Every structure is written in C-alpha cells, then in structure tokens.
Image (cartoon, helix red, strand yellow):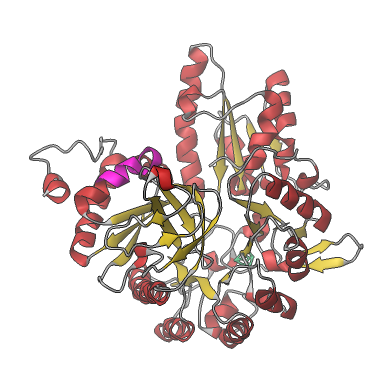
Amino acid sequence: MIPPAWRICWRPWVYVPVDAAEGADMVILNTCHIREKATEKVYSELGKLKQLKMRRAEAGNPMLVAVAGCVAQAEGAEIMARQPAVDMIVGPQSYHRLPEMIARVAREGGHALETDFPAEGKFDHLPEERAATGATAFLTIQEGCDKFCTFCVVPYTRGAEFSRPVVQIAEEAWRLAGNGVVEITLLGQNVNAYLGEGPDGTKWGLARLIRHLARIEAVKRLRYTTSHPRDMDDDLIAAHGDVEALMPYLHLPVQSGSDRVLAAMNRGHTAADYLRIVARMREARPDIALSSDFIVGFPGESDSDFEATMALVREIGYAQAFSFKYSARPGTPAAAAPRQIPDAVKDERLQTLQALLTAQQNAFNRSCEGREFSVLFEKPGRRQGQGVGRSPYLQAGACRRRRPADRRASHREDHRGAAEFAARRACGCCGTVKAKGGRALNPRHGTASDTREQVTLEFKRNALLSALAGSHSRNLVRLEQKLGVRLAQRGNLISIEGPPEQRERATLVMRALYRRLEAGEDSHPGRCRRGDQLHRARCA
Ligand code: SF4
C-alpha cells in the first residue's frame, strides 16, 4: 500500500501510482526493519529493479529508484554503496523532502540521501490530504520510541519520541470527519506516551487528546495503537470508562509472562504490573476486549519462563493476539545475547501458545453470539453486494444485501455455517449499522454449532503471497470454494479457517502453491493440471 504521505509528496511532480514496476518512471521501495531478514529482501528486490532499470534505459525510458522506510534509515549509505541502481534514500522522518530530492536528482543526476532526523517536523510540511478516505482512517499523533526494548530496532530507526501538537491533530481529525470518516485510529509507535502541546500551551496526554477529539460529533469511533503498559496512566484508563466514542478494545503488548525475560527485554514492567493494569481496565470498562503481542524463544527463555507466559495468557483471556518466534534484529542488544534458543524449540512453543490464543479468540467470539452491537462497514467484500466491517471489539464481520431494492432495510450475513443477522440501518459500506439477532458476529472465528478453528501460515515474501492471493483476493475465493475453508491474507500471513481435515489439506495446498511461485512456476488456482501432484489436493 502506498502511504498517503507519499501520494501527496509526489503530487507536485505529477507522478501517479501504477500497478507494476514495469510501467513506472519511479519506484519507491518502502521497507520495514521489523520484518525478519528485511535487508536481504531489500537487496533481492533491488537486484530485480536494477535489471528493469537497465532495460528501460536501453529503450530510452529512464527510471528513478528510491528506498524509503526503516531499512533506508538504518543502512542507507551502505545500500547506496552496494547498489548503484538506487538514486535516492529517504528515511521515515524525511518524507516531506522527497519532492526536493526528486527535483535534484532529475536536474543534476547523481544520488540523494536523507536519513537525518531533521529539525523541522515532517508533519509541518506535508500538504493536506483532501481526498475522501472512506469510513475509517489512521491519524498519526506520535512517532519514535524512547523505551529501547532489547529486541527492537524502532528507537534506532525512528528516533526519539515525538508528539504532534493537539491543534494540528484536531484539524486533521476535522478534515477527515468532513470527508466522511466515522472511525479514527490514532497511531504512534508508542501512542500512549503521547505528550503534545495543547492549545493552552500545556502538555496534553493521550486521554485528554481523546476527550478533545471525541467532541467531533461525526466521529463515532476512536481507537489507538500501539500502546505500552508503562504508559497506561490513570486518566487513560478512566477514559475507557467514560468516553463513549473510545472503542472497548485495547492492544497492549506484553511480549512475555516471565519477569526474568521481561527484564532481559528491558520492558520496564513485570507480569504483575501488567495484570494490575488489565484488572483496572476491566473495572473501568468491563466488556473491554484485549489483544497483545508475544515473542517466544527470546534468548535465555527457559521452559518455566515459557510456562509463565502461558499462565499469564490463561489468566487474562485474550480476544485476539499476535505471536511470533524471536528473531534477531542486527544491531540490537538481544541479537548478541548468549543462549539463543534453537528453532525447533521456538516452533514448538509458538504452536503451543497459538493453540491457546486461538481457543481464547474462538471463545471470545462465541461469547458475542446473540448480542447486539454496532458494526461499521468499511468496504465492499469479495462477493457481489457484500460489505465487510468491524465490531466495536475489532472483530471482522461481513454482510450482504438481501435484495438490491431493499438496500436501506436489511442485511444478511453471507458466511458458510454462520448464523444470519439483520441490520437495522443502511450499509453500503458507508456507516454504522446495528447487527441484531445473530449467533455469531464473526463467523470467521467459529460458531457454536461447528468446530471450525483457525491456523495461520507465515511465508517469507509478501509479494509472492499477494500474487498467490490474486487481485482483490480472487484466487483465494476460488481456493476457498475448492478446499471448503475460509482464507484470508494479511502481509506475509495466510489464515485458514475450517474443519480440521479441510484445514490440513488447505495448509498443504497453500504451502505447495507458494513453493511453486517461489520456483517461478505458475500457480494459478484455476488452472489445475491432471496428473499434477497438486491435483489431488486441490480438486479431489
Ligand atoms: S516500546 Fe515498542 S517500539 Fe519501543 S522499543 Fe519497545 S517494542 Fe520497540
């Protein structure tokens, strides 16, 4: 996805987005240092772009290549030295300088590198985005991090914590509301460390900012992510109880349930601190849905440390969570720590943890059966007439119009094995509706009447997985029909949901298709060759 800031950055230069690098006059690789082997992936993509750039140059069509994002920030000079095809390197704090860099390189040739943390804030220089953005939007209020967790590169690539002034944020929120946005998610690497200058000249924390934004009547929903347990102050906890627009969902990463591991991670809190915060959150907002991040196999993590994580998860009961195996990020203290954990151990622990988290997620979704709450439909679904959206608890849901003529009257869920629900108000992917009488708002995650469960597969390359999923996930829809499961792609992850047997078969098929793409073979799911070893799995 193209970050909105870039779209507006290149507007003065009349660049417009295109679908493929082949037809582009400029290619920007946006990189993320959080991903495993991020640098290797960048060099591999740059190798391909170099060939393309040469072919285009021979045909008289010059092409500019830029590398942006955290890898550019961390290793910009080296990338420039190793890969001469790169014309520009731009770090995350310097995106507003991109038009000037393009002009310089186009005019004078040579290279441009901007990886400083400039004194002027990029938010003061990015032009206003006026285009309609749909029903939901992200609004960056904070960047950077001062926490220095020992496994994380963010403090090195994004710099120190910086908070935008309240007035600037409120203006942007009003503009978004004017464009039809009804849900705003406030973003920050450490969003609840927000401490921005208020209109009265004093420093405002996140809770005060939320109360201020909640006065925009057109904005019905507010969320924020990602937060740190150390910054969950009293006012923010109280805001969950008394700000109606603040959704009952909190993503609060804990990473581990072991105090020993938490100390080694430099998290600055204990498991007991985290449990106390959760208890207070539940006091303020009893129906709050909790989500978290977990790292298993951190250097030195023993069986009993891992068991402490399992105990914490059992005690809390999450509505959803993200869990990963520890993988070293170059330059971080943990990368050089002794007692790295073997991959097989990490795999086993991750599976054990994910089984528990999936069971908790299913239990949470089942607990929503029969309840009535609002669903914000954000965009069209894969099927005709379908809208997909989110519950207040951030559960994905979908519905389909019963009859085109009756569009304003009712909606019906369109998921196999799922209960139906009727909606009271208009959908059309435009606003809040009431879901009523349904047994399961989010049938993707299980209903009372079946034993569907979910497994998530991780692949190395986002781009290959996107090719496998096809435009608008068309290939996934075909595979769903053939395999009798539900498939969803997010980044380099594919989740498969369905009865155990179908799920297993789908796992085999997805892995095999991915391997084929990796090997450069066609893996179009619609074209299945008889005699082919995948044929049985796909079409039997
Ligand atoms: S608080 Fe989050 S962003 Fe900051 S160092 Fe820790 S993991 Fe990274």
Instruction: Give coordinates of residue 507: x percent, y percent.
Output: 25, 57
Specify whether residue 251 is in view: no
Which of the four quarters of the rendered structure image does ligand 1 lie in? bottom right
Please check the rendered image and state whether residue 149 is part of the magenta-colored stretch, yes or no. Answer: no
Residue 426 is left or right of residue 454, and the answer is right
Q: Main secondary structure of the magenta part?
A: helix
Residue 321 is left or right of residue 6, and the answer is left
Specify whether residue 125 is in view: yes
**Between 218 and 222, the one nearer to me in the picture:** 218
**Between 396 and 419, the one nearer to me in the picture:** 419
Instruction: Give coordinates of residue 478: x percent, y percent.
Output: 26, 44
* Among the 4 quarters of the image, the one containing residue 371: bottom left
Going 23% across and 55% down the picture, which residue do you hit?
506
| Up/down of 74 relative to 6, above or below | below
Residue 537 is left or right of residue 41, and the answer is left
Q: Which residues are magenta?
A: 468-478
Which residue occupies the extreme right position in the image? 201
| Up/down of 88 relative to 39, above or below | above
